[in-house]
Image: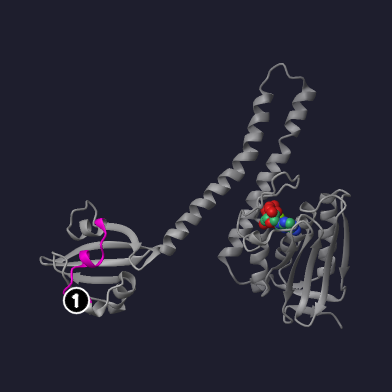
Amino acid sequence: MATEALPDGAVLMTPAGVIETFNGAAQRLLGLSGDDHGENLGVLIRHPDLAALINGELEEDLIEIAAPNDEDRRLEIRRIAVEADRILILARDVTQLNRLLTMRQDFIANVSHELRTPLTVIMGYLEATEDPSLDPATLRELLGKLLSPAQRMRALVDDLLLLTRLESSPALDPDQIGEVNVPNLVQRIVDDASQLSDGRHRINVNVDTQLRLRGVESELHSAFGNLVANAVRYSPEGGDIDVRWYHTDAGARFEVEDHGVGIQPEHLSRITERFYRIDLAGSRVRGGTGLGLSIVKHVLKRHDSGLAVRSEFGRGSRFYCVFPPQFSLPVSR
Ligand SMILES: Nc1ncnc2c1ncn2[C@@H]1O[C@H](COP(=O)(O)OP(=O)(O)OP(=O)(O)O)[C@@H](O)[C@H]1O
Ligand SMILES: [Mg+2]
């Protein structure tokens, strides 16, 4: 059969549903076997929608059903009248496509929700400014409150744009690769983190001042900065935070260790998913948007590295990544 090369299953049959021939993909997708020639497809696969499709009773000659031999897979089945007395049934596996569509819907729902929250706050303040009896001082105070939710929206949009850019180009742009002075970068990141901490944590820095990295500085800034900001955000007051950058046999290692809330094992595999946050009921620790670690994951992947996490719930976490020797640049070691 000429359809053997098709990725879709193809079954040629009489209008009554008697199978004449089918390709390998049809065997796989529909669970047909060599003995099934001459059998009736509607009898082999008992499904009311399929029966109606074969009989040409549907308005549109297209249905979607679970695969007969695998409940978790979805098949799109199409009926085409090829000649006056032949019907072609085409089956396509749409499981992956459906998954992508669901992901896209979830993504849009998440983004909309995240933008709506600060927008609602902004609108609340703006409505309050409409009161004609407001004195100038109160008016200025109200306007001042608009900044924080607006900054939140800006940060979210920046993160989304960065993530989209990282996802759409899996490899580093050679023009952007340079020698990154990680000790210097870490210092800048820790200065920012100290602002965020506002004296509530002790941040200890331990870096090999000779060790540099080949990479894209702005991306590494986002990635390392996210890890350090998380350590601050998810540690109660008084918690020590250690930031380390050192040489190992496997390559250069960046590490952030905190003594904060920690992560339960069931969440560990999911924290790098977009918008994934752990809801700690009763905790005063508040999460962000859940994009940070997705950005970290993508940046590290582009630098031939990956994120590893060790965490104990209630005790703290250690996030680290190792850059292979060809990315690490020991300076006059
Ligand atoms: N050091 C940590 N200790 C405990 N939990 C953490 C730590 N880092 C991340 N998490 C958990 O993983 C979730 C995802 O982290 P991620 O950095 O992706 O998002 P976020 O911090 O909530 O928001 P964003 O970084 O986008 O502002 C966090 O919400 C938090 O529940
Ligand atoms: Mg974060």
Q: Is residue 10 visible?
A: yes
Q: Residue at x 80, y 63 (%)?
A: 257
When asked about the image quadrant of residue 312, the answer is: bottom right
Classify mark 1: residues with Cα within 10 Å, few (<14), some (14-19) or many (20+): some
Considering only vertical position in the picture, is 278 above or below 33? above
Q: Is residue 271 visible?
A: no
- The reply to whether the magenta stretch includes residue 149 is no
Of residues 138 and 325, the one nearer the viewer is 325
- The reply to whether the magenta stretch includes residue 39 is yes
Colour approach in the figure? one colour
- Quadrant of picture, ligand 1: bottom right
Label 1: element kind: loop
Percent of width and height locating residue 171 = 61, 72
| Amino acid marked by disc 1 | His
Image-based side of 266 in relation to 237, left or right: left
Q: Residue at x 71, y 35 (%)?
A: 146
Considering only vertical position in the picture, is 188 above or below 39? above
Q: Residue at x 61, y 55 (%)?
A: 161
Image-based side of 174 in relation to 257, left or right: left
Q: Which residue is mark 1?
A: 37
Percent of width and height locating residue 204 = 89, 62
Identify the magenta region: 36-48
Percent of width and height locating residue 142 = 74, 29
When asked about the image quadrant of residue 173, the answer is: bottom right
Task: Count the labels in the image.
Answer: 1
Q: Residue at x 66, y 34 (%)?
A: 122
Query: Looking at the figure, which quarter contains the C terminus?
Result: bottom right
Query: Looking at the figure, which quarter contains the N terminus?
Result: bottom left
Percent of width and height locating residue 294 = 64, 60
